[in-house]
């Protein structure tokens, strides 16, 4: 909830009707990816507990086959 990555918001032109240019720059700081991977591991752990495990069908992304950090990051 407190990303290290920082994006930008700039004016496209002097016309106030033109939408701005937005570059979210997601995951540009490697610390954000490390926290995201750790968050997924926590979510998987919670999903495996009762009663959640009975209510959830399957993990969509990155999928249960992604187990190491590199696979999760891809």
Image (spheres, grey):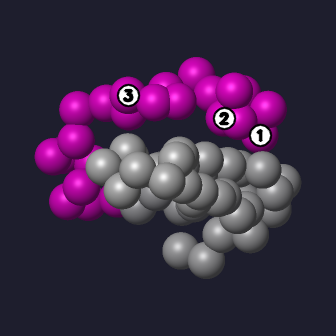
- The verdict on residue 72 being magenta is yes
Q: Quadrant of residue 42?
A: bottom right
- Which range is magenta? 47-74
Neighbor class of circle 2 (other Cα within 10 Å; few <14, some 14-19, many 20+) is some
- The verdict on residue 71 being magenta is yes
Residue 33 seen in this snapshot: no
Picture residue at 31% right of the left edge, 30% below the top: 58
Residue 69 bears which disc, if any? 1
* Disc 3: which residue: 60
Secondary structure predominantly adopted by residues drawn in magenta: loop
Residue 52: % across, % down? 24, 55
* Disc 2: which residue: 72
Picture residue at 20% right of the left edge, 59% below the top: 51
Residue 46: % across, % down? 41, 61
> Number of numbered discs present?
3
Q: In the image as oriented, which residue stretches furthest toward the top?
A: 65
Q: Quadrant of residue 65?
A: top right
Q: Disc 2, disc 1: CB below 8 Å?
A: yes
Q: In the image as oriented, which residue stretches furthest toward the bottom?
A: 2
Which of the two residues, 49 or 25, is positioned nearer the viewer here? 25
Q: Secondary structure at mark 2?
A: helix
Neighbor class of circle 3 (other Cα within 10 Å; few <14, some 14-19, many 20+) is few
Residue 29 seen in this snapshot: yes
Residue 48 is left or right of residue 66, and the answer is left
- Rounded to the nearest angstrom, the CA distance separating label 2 from label 1 is 5 Å
Residue 42 is left or right of residue 35, and the answer is left
Residue 20 drawn above or below residue 2: above
- Rounded to the nearest angstrom, the CA distance separating label 3 from label 1 is 17 Å
Q: Disc 3, disc 1: CB below 8 Å?
A: no
Q: Earlier in the sequence, mark 3 or mark 2?
A: 3
Picture residue at 66% right of the left edge, 35% below the top: 72
Residue 56: % across, % down? 22, 41
């Amino acid at each position: 909830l407190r990303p290290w990555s920082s994006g930008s918001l700039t004016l496209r032109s002097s016309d106030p009707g033109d939408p701005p240019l937005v570059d979210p720059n997601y995951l540009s700081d490697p610390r954000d990816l490390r926290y995201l991977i750790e968050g997924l591991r926590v979510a998987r752990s919670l999903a495996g507990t009762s009663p959640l495990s009975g209510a959830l069908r399957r993990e969509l992304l990155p999928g249960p086959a992604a187990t190491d950090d590199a696979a999760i990051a891809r």
